[in-house]
Amino acid sequence: MRKIEVEDLKLADIILTQAPTMKSKFIRNSIDSNFSHSILYIGGSMVIESIGDGGVVERTLDTAISGTNAAFVFRYRGLTIEQMDMISRYGKHFLGRPYDLDGAIGSAADTNFARKVGFFLPETLNAANRDDLQNRMWAEASFYCSELVALAYQTAGVPLTRGNSNEYGNSLASTHPGEIEKSHKLSCIGYLKLEKK
């Protein structure tokens, strides 16, 4: 895997990160992923992301990855300039929207971890499923990180996963970083940051 620089990034690249925190480790273990957070690159060394203490924000890439120990870049090859622009505009349109904690919790409702927890604590799994359904029905009221990224791509006509919209809402609103990491539609082009453990 090669080290890449900011100059190598393209509009609409996705940056997946992990941090050396218990919260990040819990998320990664819960969703069976190497990553716990998703960020959308919008050009000019700027990103849009949804964070717990600010909701949907625009900030510098350096600020966004400052507390991480790994930041990898994923690219949807073949995006047109128009699609890249639509993805970026979607993220900007929702600046200031609140963080979606219920949706973030609900996004893990269909993981092996949730099924194990649900076996012992069925009310916890039921609550996560309820949160997930509510998030699907009102997908754009608030956002968690990978939900914002997945819905931005869907708007441009290039969904990252096999989700869809139906009477149960938009299933792409339940996308977690692990699904983005494992999407066959994306290629990992390298890392911006990788600290040795």
Image: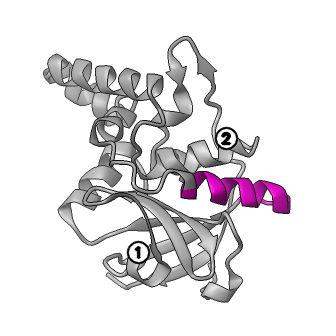
Q: Name the residue under label 1.
A: 64
Q: Nearer the viewer, residue 24 or 81?
A: 81
Which quarter of the rendered picture does the C terminus lie within? bottom left
Quick one: SS at disc 1? helix
Residue 105 location, quadrant: top left
Q: Is mark 2 on a helix, strand or loop?
A: helix
Which residue appears at 41% of the width and 77% of the height?
Answer: 65
Whether 44 is drawn above or below 168: the answer is below
Which quadrant of the figure contains the N terminus? bottom right
Q: Is residue 146 left or right of residue 127?
A: right
| Type of the residue with mark 1 | Ala
Query: Does residue 77 belong to the magenta stretch?
Result: yes
Q: Nearer the viewer, residue 120 or 148?
A: 148
Q: x%, y% of residue 84?
A: 74, 60
Residue 121 is tagged as none
Q: Mark 2 points at which residue?
A: 154
The x, y position of residue 32, in whole percent, is 40, 47
Extent of the magenta region: 76-92
Residue at the image point whose x is 30% and y is 51% from the top? 27
